[in-house]
Image (cartoon, rainbow, N blue to C red):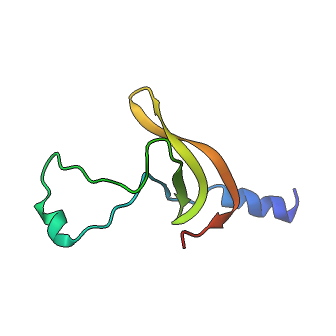
Amino acid sequence: MSNDEDEHKALLDVPLEVTAVLGTANMKVSQLLKMGRGAVVQLDRTVGEDIEIKANGNIIALGEVVVVEDHLAVTMTKIFKTSVTND
């Protein structure tokens, strides 16, 4: 096995935090403190719009929310070869 293959194999066990961002909202602390159980926070995305999939905070793909049995899941619709910043 080549040295490159050994290095790639070693990376396969590195832990990675993956996040699916359904949307974001900006609000004042006072608004947040007034919220109670059942409150609704309107996000900046619409139904059917792709969501961001991040690995360690970097956008690596776009996807859509799906239901698998009783769980929410994400199917990737576009995978980026390099991470994308959200600037």
Number of marks drawn: 0
Q: On the picture, is 36 further left or further right than 77?
A: left
Relative to 85, residue 78 above or below? above
Residue at the image point whose x is 15% and y is 70% from the top: 30
Find residue 66 and report its horizontal and vertical position in percent. 48, 35
Relative to 18, residue 76 above or below? above
Q: Nearer the viewer, residue 69 or 76?
A: 76
Quadrant position of residue 16 = bottom right
Task: Name the outermost residue toward the top.
Answer: 69
Q: Quadrant of the C terminus?
A: bottom right
Find residue 11 and report its horizontal and vertical position in percent. 67, 60
Residue at the image point whose x is 27% and y is 54% from the top: 41
Quadrant position of residue 59 = bottom right
Q: On the picture, is 44 further left or further right than 42?
A: right
Residue at the image point whose x is 53% and y is 42% from the top: 64
Task: Name the outermost residue toward the right.
Answer: 2
Q: Quadrant of the N terminus?
A: bottom right
Find residue 44 and report its horizontal and vertical position in percent. 40, 57
Quadrant position of residue 61 = bottom right
Q: On the picture, is 80 further left or further right than 17?
A: right
Find residue 63 and report its horizontal and vertical position in percent. 56, 46
Q: Nearer the viewer, residue 8 or 25?
A: 25
Residue at the image point whose x is 58% and y is 51% from the top: 62
